[in-house]
């Protein structure tokens, strides 16, 4: 492998209403929390849901487009890249944060979305508990 790529693709829901701000240079930006879910069976065979939270950053025209679909709970597919940053908090402790810089996204609203998961073999597809 001679090419390494920093790429992320996720499907999830906005964790809050997106707030669009403008930088001092006039560039529009939005930071919003994003929830993704993973489902697996526990030792008793019951479905469990694990929610992961991500920080998304939308810049420029993408922030403008997000403004039309900015409500909490909106289902999106996003593609982007990981950005690592550091800061010192109010207690003088160095913190590290991982953001996802969104490069494109698609709104995936609709009640008719598929509710099946397959693991390798379509015959083993099972209904998810939602």
Image: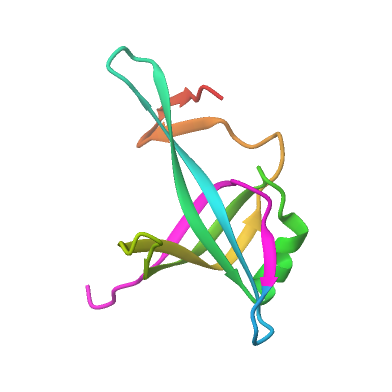
Q: Where is residue 115 in the image (x, y as percent from the top left)?
A: 56, 30
Residue farthest along the right direction in this orientation: 68
- Residue closest to the eye, 118 or 42: 42
Q: Report which quarter residue 91 is drawn in.
A: bottom left
Q: Which residue is drawn at 58% across and 67% down?
A: 104
Q: Does the magenta stretch include residue 19?
A: yes
Please check the rendered image and state whether residue 58 is part of the magenta-colored stretch, yes or no: no
Which x, y percent locates residue 7? 41, 66
Query: In the figure, is residue 66 to the left or right of 49?
Result: right
Quadrant placement of the N terminus: bottom left
Q: In percent of the image, x 43 and y 61: which residue is there?
A: 8
Q: Which residue is drawn at 50% across and 25% down?
A: 128
Q: Is residue 84 above or below residue 3?
A: above
Q: Is 70 above or below relative to 26?
A: above
**Which span is picked out in magenta?**
1-21
The quarter of the image holding the C terminus is top right
């Amino acid at each position: 492998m001679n090419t390494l790529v920093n790429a992320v693709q996720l499907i999830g829901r906005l964790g809050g209403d997106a707030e669009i701000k403008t930088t001092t240079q006039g560039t529009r930006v939005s930071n919003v929390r994003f929830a993704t879910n993973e489902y697996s069976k526990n030792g008793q065979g019951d479905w469990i849901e694990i929610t992961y939270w991500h920080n998304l950053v939308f810049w420029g025209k993408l922030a403008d487009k997000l403004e039309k679909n900015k409500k909490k709970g909106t289902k999106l597919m996003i593609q982007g890249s990981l950005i690592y940053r550091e800061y010192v908090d109010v207690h003088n402790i160095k913190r590290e944060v991982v953001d996802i810089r969104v490069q494109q996204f698609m709104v995936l609203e609709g009640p008719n979305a598929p509710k099946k998961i397959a693991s390798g073999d379509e015959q083993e597809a099972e209904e998810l508990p939602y």
